[in-house]
Each structure stands twice: as structure tokens, then as C-alpha cells.
Amino acid sequence: MNKDRKLIIAGNWKMNKTVAEALDLVAGLKRELAAIKEVDLVVAPPFTALSEVSKVILDSNIRLGAQNVSEQNVGAYTGEIAAAMLKEFSVRYVILGHSERRQYQQESNELVARKAIAVHAVALKPIICVGEVLAERESGRTEKVLETQVRGSVAGLTADQMEETVIAYEPVWAIGTGKTATTEQAQAAHAFIRRTLASLYDETVAKRVRIQYGGSVKPGNARELMSQPDVDGALVGGAALEVRSFSDIVKNSI
Ligand code: 13P
């Protein structure tokens, strides 16, 4: 495929995998994906596996992601983890504002924006998730919701920081449900997000930002989704937990 933007496919492992299981999975991915140069590959294990996984992928084409971070740099914030601490484990990407965190931890766009600033402050790259719930889509509010989420979640980022930020469009109704957005729905949402970025920054910035699709991505639908002009990769949940399915998604996307 001929896109100016390099595809980025990330596995969001969510709250799955012990350290031993994580090492197994990543050893398999290293083996299966060693030859892949066309795609930026990222795995985001739980915090508890970051240290061990980071050692194993050091000499590979797989980069490390985390699933969350504190908006604070240091101090009395029990249970929180700072961006600089993630950097110690060679983490490169941090998933922010996933719909599960927006739902269960009440994360707001404002909080996501503060976290994105904290992530950039230590030169890591945020993957900022946005996406509408089913009722919003069905009542024709998808674009309004996406615009509010994108505007709010990137507030305060400079143009340079924006270019180094990944957006993940994850329609909430497609997450873990086996329902995937149609290629037309995905492309339309991605193009809309890019237009929103162009209005917030400019065309050049908007053209450089990679926008991943997430929500029931599988080996069987990856190629069609990735072939859309504004779809620049995938954020994969369930299918990222097995060597075969994640590797096939990557290979089918090229
Ligand atoms: P599934 O691929 O399991 O639908 O999850 C998508 C997701 O939430 C990735 O962040």
C-alpha cells in the first residue's frame, strides 16, 4: 500500500497476561514478525509485565507501549505511575483515554489532555483513543462526539507534539463485540478526525498524524480496513493476545 504515513499496529493487552504468559506471547511475536519493516509494531502489556517484556524486545522491531499513565510527574499520588517511570522500561507509546478508562475510571477529555502533555514532556508518544457509543451513532451524533473528544483530548499540544501523537478511533460498540465498523464507517470517521485536526492545527499536521482503527480487528478484516486512505493502523484487543492472530493481522495489513 502506498501511504505517506507508516502503518502502526498495536496490541492492547488490557488486564491480561501474567509475566510468564507475556514473555511467551512476545517471544512468539518476535519470531513471527522479525522480518516486518513496513509497519511500526507495538505491544502494550499490563504495567507488571513491562520490565520483563522490555528486556526481551530490546533487540527486535517491536516497541513497548503502556496502557495508562499519571498526569502528574512525581509525588504523593498513591497507586499512580509517572511517564518518566515508564521511560525507564524503554516504553515508547502510552495509550490514553481508552473507552474502558473513560467509562470505568470516568476519565475526561481534560484529563486525557493533561496526560498527553505529561507523556510528551518525557518524549514518549501518546495513543489517544476516541470513539462514540452505539446510542450516539444511532442518533446521528458521531461527528459531534468525535469532534468534542479530539478537541478536548489534544488541547494544549503544540503542532510538533500533535504530529508525534497517534489517534485511535475505537467505536465503543465495536470493542470486544465481534462487530466491526464497516470500512466505509471507519474511513468516514477517520477522515472526519483528520479534518478536525486540520482545523485545530493545519493540513500539514493533519496529514502527518496516524489514525488507528480499533474494535474487533481480526486477521480477516485487517486488510480491508488498512486499505482505507485514512486508516493508518490498528489498535487490537482480543486478537492481540495470541501470536497467530496478531501476526496474521500484521501480515495481512501489508
Ligand atoms: P477488541 O479488539 O477486543 O475489540 O478491543 C479493541 C480495543 O479496545 C483495543 O484498544
Image (cartoon, rainbow, N blue to C red):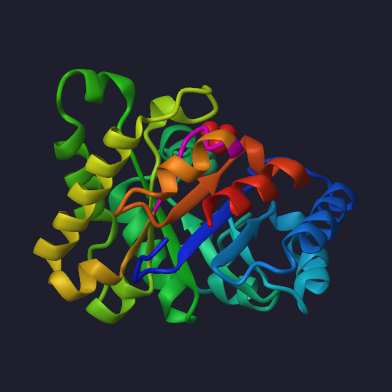
Residue at 52% across, 32% down: 216
Front residue (pair 19, 35): 35
Compared with 15, 71 (above or below) is below
Left or right: residue 72 versus residue 3 is right
Q: Residue at x 50, y 75 (%)?
A: 124
Residue 203: x and y in percent read: 14, 70
Q: Which residues are magenta?
A: 212-219
- Residue at the far left in the pictured view: 199
Using residue 102 as the reference point, say whether residue 92 is left or right of it.
right
Q: How many marks?
A: 0
Q: Is residue 140 above or below residue 228?
A: above
In the image, what residue occupies the spot 78% across and 79% down? 59
Residue 215 counted in the magenta span = yes
As rendered, which of 25 and 3 lies closer to the eye? 3
Q: Position of residue 37 (x, y in %)?
A: 60, 72
Extreme residue toward the front, this view: 1
Q: Residue at x 29, y 81 (%)?
A: 160
> Percent x, y for residue 233?
46, 54
Figure quadrant of residue 55: bottom right
Q: Quadrant of the N terminus?
A: bottom left
Does residue 187 show up magenta in the picture? no
Q: 101 and 137: which one is in front? A: 137
Q: Is residue 204 visible?
A: yes
Residue closest to the eye, 246 or 53 = 246
240 w.r.t. 93: above or below: above
Residue 70, visible in the rendered structure: no
Residue 100 place in picture, x, y as percent: 49, 36
